[in-house]
Amino acid sequence: MRVTVSDRAVASPCINICDIDATGLCTGCARTLDEIARWPDESAAWRASVLAALPARRASGIR
């Protein structure tokens, strides 16, 4: 997949608190290792869908 400048417009939610908990999610950004690894190569639409899922993960206590 080719990443374009417009794809890079969706910023990473990383807050530099990188620790994967027992549920497999980062305690800082609530992404999975797979999501973190794929982030640089994915489209803006994919990134937006990940970002949209994060508030529910945090609200439900899934970390």
Image (cartoon, helix red, strand yellow):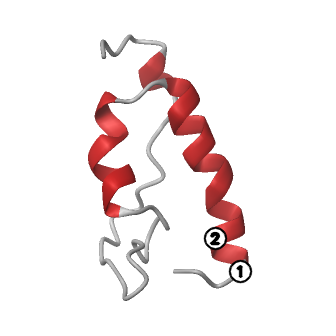
Q: Residue at x 43, y 77 (%)?
A: 27
**Element carrying mark 1:** loop
Q: Is residue 56 above or below residue 19?
A: above
**Element carrying mark 2:** helix
Q: Label 1, on which residue?
A: 60
Q: Is residue 11 above or below residue 9?
A: below
Give neighbour class at mark 2: few <14, some 14-19, many 20+ (Cα, 10 Å). Answer: some
Can you say which quadrant of the picture contains the N terminus? top left
Residue 41 is labelled as none
Three-letter amino acid code at the position of disc 2: Arg
Residue 47 lies, in percent from the top left, at: 51, 37
Three-letter amino acid code at the position of disc 1: Ser
Q: Quadrant of residue 45?
A: top right
Q: Residue at x 42, y 73 (%)?
A: 25
Q: Are marks 2 and 1 in contact (CB under 8 Å)?
A: yes
Q: Is residue 52 above or below residue 5?
A: below
Q: Nearer the viewer, residue 19 or 33?
A: 33
Residue 40 lies, in percent from the top left, at: 30, 34
Residue 18 lies, in percent from the top left, at: 30, 71
Q: Label 2, on which residue?
A: 57
Q: Residue at x 46, y 24 (%)?
A: 43
Q: Quadrant of residue 15?
A: bottom left
Give neighbour class at mark 1: few <14, some 14-19, many 20+ (Cα, 10 Å). Answer: few
Label 2 to label 1: alpha-carbon separation? 5 Å
Q: Residue at x 69, y 63 (%)?
A: 55
